[in-house]
Image: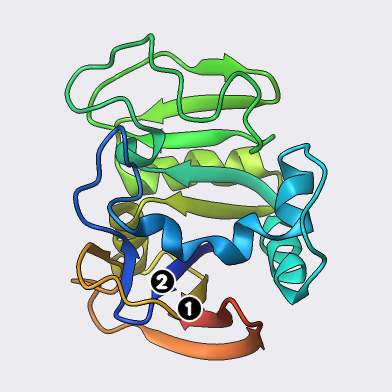
């Protein structure tokens, strides 16, 4: 069965997004301060089909989290498009050729037909996290399922005991407010198995002991 993993950038005070998230500011006020380690890396640029970036230890982390992923799961807020019934003119944040290049399953309370883009199909799942995981594992073909966010979706999988691996990218900033990852997730046992550091982030991989 496919392993289930997620990775997330987090501030020193435990926030994975800033306050006042909106369509204009999806990661909240100050949330972009969590991602310089990503945007500066050659691996991120390459994954987006672009030139540029630096070859650093952060590149190796990005390549690691992208390697072997067969499908993704994300929440409604991560996909975007507002609350309530779908405005089907909304096709996600990523344009007509998203960099996922794998099936993506979107948790939602409102039905919508699959959205087929170049290299990526978004399937909208109304049956909750277990139903989404079953579909994602079938689609992954033995590769990993990656929980792509947002924080609420990651919390659901962690609280439900459905996560095998959590990779936290601890960034040396203090946001002061926003959305926390480790809130109302019970008391999971997290076993650190790897630590990598750079000037921009400390990357800690945990195995979630079920």
Label 1 near label 2: C-beta < 8 Å?
yes
Q: Residue at x 31, y 34 (%)?
A: 24
Which quadrant would residue 91 be assigned to in this image? top left
Q: Residue at x 33, y 57 (%)?
A: 151
Q: Quadrant of the C terminus?
A: bottom left
Classify mark 2: helix, strand or loop: strand
Q: Residue 10's mark?
A: 2
Residue 115 visible: yes
Say which of 95 and 25 sits in front. 25
Classify mark 1: helix, strand or loop: strand
- Label 1: how many Cα within 10 Å (few below 14, some 14–19, many 20+): many
Q: How is the image coloured?
A: rainbow
Q: Where is 75 relative to 40, above or below? A: above
* Residue 195 point in image, percent of width and height: 63, 88
* Residue 9 point in image, percent of width and height: 47, 67
Q: Residue at x 71, y 44 (%)?
A: 141
Q: Is residue 1 left or right of residue 142?
A: left
Q: Where is 54 relative to 89, above or below? A: below
Q: Quadrant of the N terminus?
A: bottom right
* Residue 192 point in image, percent of width and height: 54, 90
* Number of on-image labels: 2
Residue behind mark 1? 170
């Amino acid at each position: 069965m496919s392993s289930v993993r997620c990775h997330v950038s987090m501030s020193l005070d435990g926030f994975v997004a800033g306050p006042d998230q909106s369509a204009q500011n999806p990661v909240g006020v100050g949330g972009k301060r969590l991602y310089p380690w990503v945007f500066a890396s050659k691996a991120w640029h390459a994954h987006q089909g672009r030139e540029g970036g630096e070859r650093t230890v952060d590149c190796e982390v990005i390549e690691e989290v992208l390697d072997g992923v067969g499908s993704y799961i994300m929440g409604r807020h991560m996909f975007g498009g507002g609350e309530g019934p779908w405005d089907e003119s909304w096709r996600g944040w990523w344009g007509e050729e998203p960099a996922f290049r794998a099936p993506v399953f979107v948790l939602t309370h409102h039905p919508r037909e699959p959205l087929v883009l170049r290299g990526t199909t978004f399937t909208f799942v109304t049956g909750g996290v277990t139903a989404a995981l079953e579909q994602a594992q079938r689609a992954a073909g033995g590769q990993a399922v990656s929980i792509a966010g947002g924080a609420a979706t990651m919390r659901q999988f962690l609280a439900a005991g459905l996560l095998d691996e959590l990779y936290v990218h601890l960034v040396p900033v203090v946001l002061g407010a926003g959305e926390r990852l480790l809130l109302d997730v019970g008391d999971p046992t997290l076993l650190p198995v790897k630590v990598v550091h750079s000037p921009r982030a400390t990357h800690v991989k945990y195995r979630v002991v079920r």
